[in-house]
Image (tube, rainbow, N blue to C red):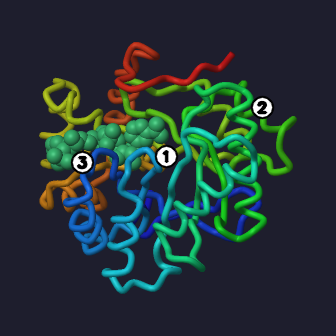
Amino acid sequence: MSLSIESSFPLANSKSKIPQIGFGVYQSPPETCVKSCLKALEAGYRHIDTAQYYANETEVGHAREQSKLPRSELYLTSKILSPAEDVESTYKKIAESVEKLDGPDGYADLFLVHSPNAGSEARRLMWQALELAKERNNVRDIGVSNYGIQHIEEIKSIGKTWPPVVNQVELHPWCQQREVVKYCKKNNIVVEAYCPLVRNEKAKDKTLLNISEKHNVGPNQILVRWSLQKGYVPLPKSDTPSRIVSNADVYGFELDEEDMAKLDGLDQGKKGAIVQAVTNE
Ligand SMILES: NC(=O)c1ccc[n+]([C@@H]2O[C@H](COP(=O)([O-])OP(=O)(O)OC[C@H]3O[C@@H](n4cnc5c(N)ncnc54)[C@H](OP(=O)(O)O)[C@@H]3O)[C@@H](O)[C@H]2O)c1
């Protein structure tokens, strides 16, 4: 398998490609976020994953500007967690985020409904507002996060755009969400993996450490590599410069079938989730 930091995936019904590795900025405080994003861009990441909820879209925008990279070489994602009272005012919330990320005439590459948890009316308002944002060129592509199969199916009856190009879910060896992953693959929906490092909580796991020693790399590098080899889009987060670099330094080794099988065998289903597993029915 020849993966590189430049690997990307095509998206359903889109001219854009999504870089396979992304840089997460959840809990990256504003005073650190610009520096961390610039470090990530220097290390070769080209895809940054933020959200309205993370309160650092402005800082991601500053990093974009300071990096001097052509906009077309960057891939910026944000998410909306709750709607306003109607579709048009929900659209305005999305347009405000896009302006923070990329200025008044700018765009976001991808915008997601952050979660289905606010209920069916909230999901409808947010999806239809995302469709408006796409029509009005504020965003290139639209997708979802934490959606189970039922929530994705629901979009067929509320929207004009189907499928959502991605579903971003918690995904690591201990929480593999096999049912929704299988459904997404079948429907040409790219699966993004959040908490790919399990927030370092499994760094002492014996199976992981054995594989890490075998390849002479850190446990977090094994987790990112596993995610890449599974065909997911991992979004490792760090505010520590050396970790930002090492989490993306995963292209000089390859996990073999036995390593992959051992990691696949760690699945604990919903119990293995540290944030949230999706509800499929
Ligand atoms: N859609 C959603 O609902 C949702 C939910 C959660 C996350 N996300 C997205 O997914 C991204 C990643 O998830 P996450 O941030 O929750 O968790 P994560 O990436 O699994 O782990 C991040 C944590 O691990 C630490 N860490 C990073 N690299 C490390 C290394 N090499 N060695 C030891 N510790 C290391 C970080 O600390 P330092 O920063 O101190 O280095 C941070 O505390 C988020 O930033 C966000 O973009 C989305």
Question: Neighbour class for label 1 at 10 Å: few (<14), some, many (≥20)?
Answer: many
Q: Which residue is drawn at 31% across and 71% down?
A: 41
Name the residue located 53 percent from the left edge and 80 percent from the top edge.
72
Q: Is residue 88 above or below residue 107?
A: above
Q: What residue type is labelled 2?
A: Glu
| Mark earlier in primary sequence (2, 1) | 2
Mark 1 → mark 3, Cα distance in angstroms: 15 Å
* Image location (x, y in percent) of residue 241: 15, 61
Disc 3/disc 2 C-alpha distance (Å) = 35 Å
Secondary structure type for disc 2: helix
Secondary element at tag 3:
helix
The reply to whether residue 214 is visible in this rendering is: no
Q: Given the image, on which type of amino acid does mark 3 rest?
A: Gln
Q: Is residue 152 visible?
A: yes
Q: Is residue 223 above or below residue 266?
A: below
Query: Residue 232 bears which disc, if any?
Result: 1
Residue 143, how many percent across, how many down?
64, 48
> Counting residues from the N terminus, which is met first, the one under dot 1 or under dot 3?
3
- Residue at 33 percent of width and 52 percent of height: 25
User: Relative to residue 262, is residue 193 depicted above or below?
Assistant: below
Q: Which residue position holds label 2?
A: 153
Q: In terms of depth relative to the viewer, which is nearer, 26 or 163?
A: 26
